[in-house]
Image: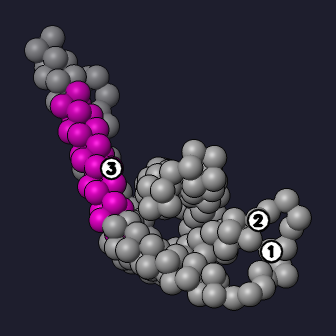
Amino acid sequence: MIYARTEIFSSSWSRVRLADAWENRAIRIKAISFALIGLVNTVVDYSVFLSARAALEQTTEVPALFVARSVSRDTVILIAANVAAWLVAVTGSYIMNSSVTFAVESGRKLRWRDYAAFVGAGIAGLIANTVMLVFGAKCLLLPLWIAKAVAIVASFLVNFSLSHFVVFPVRDSSRPKIYQPARRDCMG
């Protein structure tokens, strides 16, 4: 009887460890996938940022929407170019992450509601990105490319965390059966 209980405990413990390892593996794979998609989006983001910045620097007037007495023209251009780049990149990111990284959770379906949640989470990443960009470029006086790289890392951390835990949470119905170990009472 003691042997049988030990065997059941050992079997249950092994299943729990296997489920934990599988879940940790899944998170690592998701982080890698999110990062690879992020690399593509970084190229898109940076390209749009440079193009928008160059176009805005050619204008003689700063758009009235951004006029503020305490903000310099250069800062307004940085913010406007960064927001334009983000708008393009966030849409591509949603499509790719819904189809690849969080395919199980999203069912590989694009939904306006999920897109809105993704954008909402992305706004937190945008704020982190913009604050780090302006702080790095204007306060720390980092070269612009370094300030932008630091801003991208900050937004990656915010975006992955919110995407994984808030936008695309794992639901019991979307989990593979390995996540749901069989339950047995201690008598067999």
Q: Residues within 10 Å of mark 2 (few under 14, many from 20)?
A: few
Q: Is residue 88 left or right of residue 39?
A: right
Residue at figure coordinates x 47%, y 74% from the top left: 45
Residue type marked 1: Phe
On-image quarter of the C terminus = top left
Q: Residue at x 33, y 54 (%)?
A: 31
Please give left or right for residue 184 compared with residue 155 in the image: left
Which of disc 3 and disc 2 is earlier in sequence?
3
Element on which disc 3 rests: helix
Observer-side mark, 1 or 3, equals: 1
Disc marking residue 66? 1
Q: Are marks 2 and 1 in contact (CB under 8 Å)?
A: no
The answer to whether 182 is drawn above or below residue 176 in the figure is above
Residue kind at label 3, given as amino acid type: Ile
Count of marks placed on residues: 3
Please state if 127 lies on the left or on the right of 47 as rendered. right
Most distant residue in the right direction? 69
CB within 8 Å, label 1 to label 3: no
For residue 72, which numbered disc appears in the image? 2
Q: Is residue 36 magenta?
A: yes
Q: Whole-percent x and y of residue 63?
A: 79, 83
Which label was assigned to residue 27?
3
Estimate the spatial distance between the alpha carbons at disc 1 and disc 3, rounded to whole Å. 40 Å
Q: Is residue 31 left or right of residue 178?
A: right
